[in-house]
Amino acid sequence: MDRIPILKLGDALLVTIQVDMHDRLATALEEDLTSKIVAFGAKGVLIDISALEIVDSFIGRMLDNIAAVSRILDAETVVVGMRPAVAITLVELGLSLSGVKTALNVERGMALIKSRLEEFDADDED
Amino acid sequence: MPTTRTDRLEIRSSDDVVKVRQQTRVMAIEAGLSLVDQTKIITAASELARNTLDYGGGGELRLEVVEDVGRRGLRLTFEDSGPGIADIQQAMKDGFTTGSGLGLGLGGAKRLSNEFSINSKPGAGTKITIGRWKS
């Protein structure tokens, strides 16, 4: 079965979705990600969707699920690279992805995760 | 209304939903739709194809590039012979679902289309037609 590769990038994991997602692939990704978050002690998950031409409610729900499970495992999910036409369509569809943080690109997403880590470090020093 | 090209696709599996998106894209480009309009109708097609599969037990999609006086666009007709919808008004509401989805499919597909019609009766299957016109 196909699997979506998950790369380790500092304290975060990077997933680049490049193929048309179907059900089995989405389920496999959720499972792979959660086990890698635990294995690497990752504090963040970056999901790059810049290659996706559409995001429907199925993919939207997958992103929401990943964010929710990651949060429970103490990792922040940031969805990056959404195309403008996809954003317009998502809002009209009625999906606001309210449970998911977003950033324009991988660099900004990484910065978001780093700033969260620094906040934690600052808290520890208190 | 003259149809310049017609295509048909079976919707029997999750992989067919992927094929629906791909073929809708090809026909939307042929119809001359803008990138945003393409994205909208592909997304609507993806929602409806999944409904056909999950609630209609599979079915068929007819794709037509249509041309009328002064307008051109893409029309999609999803048809299944599943259990049908008892209360269409309720099914159109956001958040209503009898399955495990988000309940955005029908209402969302309508919002993403310029034209929308639904025909369904319990026991008689469901037929949904959407259209997106070149703006």
Image: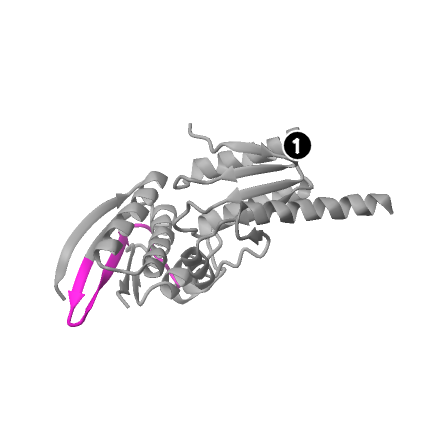
From which residue to which does the magenta span run? B65-87
Name the foreground residue: B23 vs B116: B23
Q: Position of residue A9 (x, y in %)?
A: 60, 35
Q: Residue at 37% of width from left, 63% of height from top?
A: B112
Name the foreground residue: B127 vs A53: A53
Which amino acid type corresponds to the residue marked 1 in the rendered image? Val
- The correct choice, above or below, for B103 with respect to B12 in the image is below
Q: Position of residue B25 (x, y in %)?
A: 29, 51
Q: Residue at 55% of width from left, 38% of height from top?
A: A14
Q: Residue furthest front?
A: A107
The N terminus of chain B lies in quadrant: bottom left
Q: Residue at 14% of width from left, 60% of height from top?
A: B3
Q: Position of residue A55 (x, y in %)?
A: 43, 51
- On screen, residue B10 versus residue B99, left or right, reads left
**Could you tell me which chain the residue with mark 1 belongs to?**
A
Q: Residue at 60% of width from left, 31% of height from top?
A: A36
Work out whether residue B100 can be spotted: no
Q: Residue furthest right?
A: A126
Q: Residue furthest bottom?
A: B69
Classify residue A89 by image quadrant.
Answer: bottom left
Work out whether residue B92 can be spotted: yes
The C terminus of chain B lies in quadrant: bottom left
> How many numbered tags mark residues here?
1
Classify residue B127 by image quadrant.
Answer: bottom left
The overriding secondary structure of the stretch rendered in magenta is strand
The residue that mark 1 highlights is A38
**Colouring method of the image:** one colour
- On screen, residue B39 versus residue A30, left or right, reads left
Residue B9 is one of the magenta-drawn residues: no
Label 1 sits on a secondary structure element that is helix
Residue B86 is one of the magenta-drawn residues: yes
